[in-house]
């Protein structure tokens, strides 16, 4: 079971909300399916992100994938060392490899619990 | 979705299976870059069961092939293989293929792309109406496994009855591999030395296992389609749907060496018009880029704020340690060394026109 202190998107982002601030990253499932990561583009501090819309891009050897926001709000902070240390995503996708912190205004109605997300991953293979 | 006879073998090896051209295929086992390096330095084993395989027999097999495809089938000696294209009447590429003349000179064998197999078969059967020829799709009954890399001969010799050193590049023979009579060619899609075997009677799992047993101690591993794409791209080989497709002709793609104008193939008249006009105004070129971003298929190419082309394929090259791409650009910007920009998310990134192939093995 993945961490139960947060919610998950079908598109494999996670979102942990504490005191009105959401920390967002991508799951181990996303990382293992992307493999051979080469580039990460995150938004600037102060940018706004919107539910279901792209907040950045992650590039692997073969493809570029968008990162989709589970919430709407303003970016308060980004993990500025992560783009130069992409191996963190494989090592600690739920901790050290967080991507952005956002001042929450609203969250997606489609967020899943860890148990539901585990089942979603199993179905996806 | 179709599956090759090695599906469960791949799953047991931990492959990530993906849909590819209607087949369930392994895209990677361990990691694309690592697998590509293994092929460049040791050897790798590939399941190519998805590729179309067609036997062409009958008194007019040669005449049929002269009409069907661009290379000169009459000039292929028994036991030799040529690269060619199937075009439409407009001279646009329907597929790129390999044409094999049987070692005993009793017909031909054609290997075609998985994604184009239904269309190719329809074209072949249509052209065949005017010839005394039998076109036999044996994709389902004949497997295909490739070994590629500098150790290919050493490994394959352990399980092959005949002397492989005597087999020339782009030649094939009837032989016995792990006790099973089959054909074997010195061909591949990686830029390395290697062989492809055409496995009868559902023996793919046995042949795969024997290759593995012969090669594992030397560092050989299974290789997925992801690394196969990287390897072919480094070696300057086109991929249908990227460098060539129904909107390109072989002359602008730099494949004129596989087009012989001495016979009457479908599309020849259109190519003569292109030649008379001095080309189409664009050319397929290589690009390299040290940018953090990799040029990808479809990205626009700019010069001085004006679009001058677009990217066909982009890859991170583990062998060259840089980004490589192929692209169609206007002829005046096709000279190696010409700086251009590719556009990713509305941002221009620098790249330079480069000679292809990006990688050529030492011989």
Image: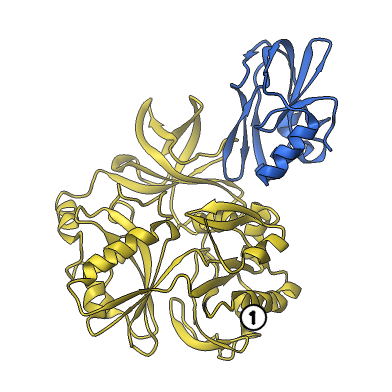
Chain colours: A blue, B yellow
Q: Decide if residue B306 is on the left or right side of residue A78.
A: left
Q: Name the residue under label 1.
A: B154
Rendered location of residue B186, percent (x, y) = 49, 77
Q: In this view, does B335 lie above or below B10?
A: above
- Mark 1 element type: helix
Residue at image point 68% right, 47% down: A125
Could you tell me if residue B43 is visible in this image? yes
Rendered location of residue B42, percent (x, y) = 66, 68
Number of numbered discs present? 1
Between B124 and B252, the residue placed more toward the observer is B124
Rendered location of residue B337, percent (x, y) = 43, 43
Between B97 and B53, the residue placed more toward the observer is B53
Rendered location of residue A95, percent (x, y) = 83, 30
Residue at image point 46% right, 65% down: B51
Toward which corner of the image does residue B341 lie, by quadrant? top left
Could you tell me if residue B222 is visible in this image? no
Residue at image point 42% right, 61% down: B113
Between B35 and B352, the residue placed more toward the observer is B35
Toward which corner of the image does residue B259 lie, by quadrant? bottom left
Residue at image point 61% right, 49% down: B321
Mark 1 is surrounded, within 10 Å at the Cα level, by few (under 14), some (14 to 19) or many (20 or more) other residues, namely some
Q: Decide if residue B45 is on the left or right side of residue B343.
A: right
Between B54 and A109, the residue placed more toward the observer is A109
Q: Decide if residue B76 is on the left or right side of residue B183.
A: left
Q: Is residue B327 above or below residue A23?
A: below
Chain identifier of the residue bearing label 1 in the image: B
Toward which corner of the image does residue B84 lie, by quadrant? bottom left
């Amino acid at each position: 079971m993945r961490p139960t202190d947060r919610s998950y998107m079908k598109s494999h982002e996670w979102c942990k909300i504490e005191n009105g601030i959401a920390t967002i990253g991508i799951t181990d499932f996303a990382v293992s399916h992307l493999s051979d990561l080469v580039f990460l583009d995150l938004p600037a501090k102060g940018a706004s992100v919107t539910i279901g819309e792209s907040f950045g891009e992650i590039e692997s050897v073969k493809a570029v994938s968008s990162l989709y926001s589970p919430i709407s709000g303003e970016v308060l902070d980004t993990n500025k060392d992560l783009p130069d240390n992409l191996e963190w995503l494989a090592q600690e996708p739920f901790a050290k490899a967080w991507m952005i912190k956002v001042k929450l205004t609203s969250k997606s109605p489609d967020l899943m619990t860890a148990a539901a997300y585990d089942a979603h991953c199993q179905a996806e293979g | 979705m179709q599956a090759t006879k090695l599906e469960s073998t791949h799953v047991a090896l931990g492959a990530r299976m993906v849909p590819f051209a209607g087949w369930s295929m392994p895209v990677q086992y361990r990691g694309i870059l690592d697998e590509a390096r293994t092929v460049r330095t040791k050897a790798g084993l590939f399941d190519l069961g998805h590729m179309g395989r067609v036997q062409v027999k009958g008194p007019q097999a040669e005449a049929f092939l002269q009409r069907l495809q661009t290379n000169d089938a009459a000039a292929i000696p028994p036991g030799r293989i040529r690269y060619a294209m199937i075009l439409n009447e407009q001279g646009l590429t329907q597929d790129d293929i390999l044409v094999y003349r049987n070692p005993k000179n009793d017909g031909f064998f054609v290997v075609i792309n998985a994604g184009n197999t239904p269309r190719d078969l329809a074209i072949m059967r249509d052209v065949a109406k005017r010839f005394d020829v039998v076109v036999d799709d044996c994709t389902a009954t004949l497997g295909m496994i490739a070994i590629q890399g500098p150790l290919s001969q050493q490994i394959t010799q352990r399980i092959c009855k005949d002397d492989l050193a005597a087999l020339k590049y782009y030649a094939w023979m009837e032989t016995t591999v792990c006790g099973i009579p089959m054909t074997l060619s010195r061909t591949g899609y990686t830029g390395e030395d290697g062989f492809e075997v055409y496995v009868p009677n559902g023996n793919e799992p046995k042949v795969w296992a024997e290759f593995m047993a012969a090669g594992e101690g030397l560092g050989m591993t299974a290789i997925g389609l992801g690394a196969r794409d990287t390897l072919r791209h480094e070696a300057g080989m086109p991929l249908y749907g990227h460098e060539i497709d129904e909107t390109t002709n072989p002359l602008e793609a730099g494949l004129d060496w596989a087009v012989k104008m001495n016979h009457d193939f479908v599309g020849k008249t259109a190519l003569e018009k292109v030649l008379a006009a001095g080309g189409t105004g664009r050319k397929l070129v290589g690009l390299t880029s040290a940018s953090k971003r990799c040029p990808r298929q479809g990205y626009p190419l700019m010069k001085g704020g004006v679009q001058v082309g677009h990217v066909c394929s982009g890859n991170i090259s583990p062998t060259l340690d840089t980004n490589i791409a192929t692209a169609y650009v206007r002829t005046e910007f096709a000279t190696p060394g010409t700086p251009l920009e590719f556009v990713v998310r509305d941002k221009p990134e620098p790249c330079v026109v480069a000679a292809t192939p990006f990688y050529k093995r030492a011989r």
